[in-house]
Image: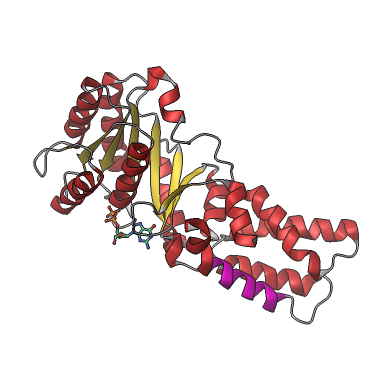
């Protein structure tokens, strides 16, 4: 399926490295642990999370005296599951359950090129497939291409796109989009924002302004602030997560392009380091290639 196919590269790479890490060894010793540390770091798990995992395995080895390398897969499976923050909410149904969250307002943030527009299109498609009415707001008014791309997705999926001319105030577009969605009794409205990481204060001010405007129309909006990260960019993704979480309250992550990387360990590292649930993962360029993140499914697919 989409998940297995999308994680194929990571899986193949990860297990071939593990095989090398334990070659000729029957028990987990310091050498094996050193190799394992390298495997995790080179899979973009991140140094902090890697060290946590290694320490936990060390403790287990110390306790059990002998741990065979044949047990390593099942141990890793436990540890990886432990490190992943479970995605408690976000099933599309959740969005419509609470009547007071109508329209359900999703603000999407992230730098250019990470797959923001594509993810918005895919989300709109999923919501629509689930019988919900969707509005899109083109509040990235700094790039003509961003508005055009969102428009194309809107047409493809068959949902209205609220936009203004290039260079107009993003908060004003957000206001229009949320107002229209509300006036038309829409279930969900997704707002695209500009992905410029000029400086922290600017970014913070801009996002705060957009949020405040939405809250004037729908109390508690935005209900979700999704940060989109490109899973194939390793340390850059960590850095962007740091900057955006400092600038605004991010409630969920979307990690894209996992199909194109052998370093899917980034999901693990980011989830652990930022303690923000991964809501969705991007596994391809097509409309269907976005999946709700489920910790168990993810781990099953990796080890299955
Ligand atoms: P934006 O600048 O952040 O809005 O990025 P776009 O949505 O335009 O995406 C940039 C490129 O990444 C496009 O070519 C997309 O087709 C591609 N892309 C987005 N998500 C995924 C994904 O999950 N997998 C793959 N393979 N490509 C993706």
Task: Left or right? Give the position of 191 relative to 300.
Answer: left
Quarter of the rendered structure image containing ligand 1: bottom left
| Residue 20 within the segment the image draws in magenta | yes
Task: Left or right? Give the position of 244 relative to 293.
Answer: left
| Residue 237 within the segment the image draws in magenta | no
The foreground one among 118 and 244 is 118
Residue located farthest toward the left when viewing the structure as drawn: 165
User: In which quadrant is the C terminus drawn?
Assistant: bottom right
Q: Is residue 154 above or below residue 211?
A: below
Tell me which residue sits at (79%, 60%) in the image: 58
Q: Quadrant of residue 200?
A: top left
Tell me which residue sits at (39%, 41%) in the image: 226
Q: Quadrant of residue 178?
A: top left
Residue 42 spot, x, y in % from top left: 56, 69
Q: Which residues are magenta?
A: 10-21
Tell me which residue sits at (39%, 36%) in the image: 130
Residue 267 spot, x, y in % from top left: 52, 54
Residue located farthest toward the bottom when viewing the structure as drawn: 24
The foreground one among 140 and 190 is 190
């Amino acid at each position: 399926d989409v998940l297995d196919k999308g994680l194929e590269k990571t899986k193949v790479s990860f297990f071939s490295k593990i095989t090398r890490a334990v070659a000729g060894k029957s028990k987990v010793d310091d050498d094996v642990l050193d190799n394992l540390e390298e495997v995790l770091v080179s899979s973009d798990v991140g140094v902090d999370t890697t060290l946590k995992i290694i320490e936990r395995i060390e403790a287990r080895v110390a306790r059990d005296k002998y741990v065979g390398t044949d047990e390593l897969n099942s141990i890793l499976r436990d540890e990886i599951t432990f490190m992943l923050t479970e995605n408690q909410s976000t099933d599309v149904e959740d969005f419509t359950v609470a009547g007071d969250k109508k329209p359900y307002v999703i603000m999407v943030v992230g730098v250019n090129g990470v797959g923001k527009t594509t993810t918005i299109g895919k989300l709109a498609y999923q919501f629509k497939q689930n019988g919900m009415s969707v509005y899109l707001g083109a509040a990235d008014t700094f790039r003509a291409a961003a508005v055009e791309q969102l428009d194309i997705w809107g047409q493809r999926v068959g949902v209205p796109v609220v936009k203004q001319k290039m260079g107009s105030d993003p908060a004003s577009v957000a206001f229009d989009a949320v107002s229209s969605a509300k006036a038309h009794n829409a279930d969900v409205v997704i707002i695209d924002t500009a992905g410029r990481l000029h400086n922290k204060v600017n970014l913070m001010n801009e996002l705060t302004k957009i949020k405040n405007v939405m809250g004037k129309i729908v109390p508690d909006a935005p209900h979700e602030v999704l940060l989109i990260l490109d899973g194939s960019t390793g340390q850059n993704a960590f850095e962007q997560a740091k900057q955006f979480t400092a600038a605004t309250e991010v409630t969920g992550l979307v990690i894209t392009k996992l199909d194109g990387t052998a370093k899917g360990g980034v999901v693990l590292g980011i989830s652990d380091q930022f303690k923000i649930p991964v809501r969705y993962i991007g596994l391809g360029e097509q409309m269907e290639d976005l999946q709700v993140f489920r910790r168990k499914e993810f781990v099953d697919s990796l080890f299955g």
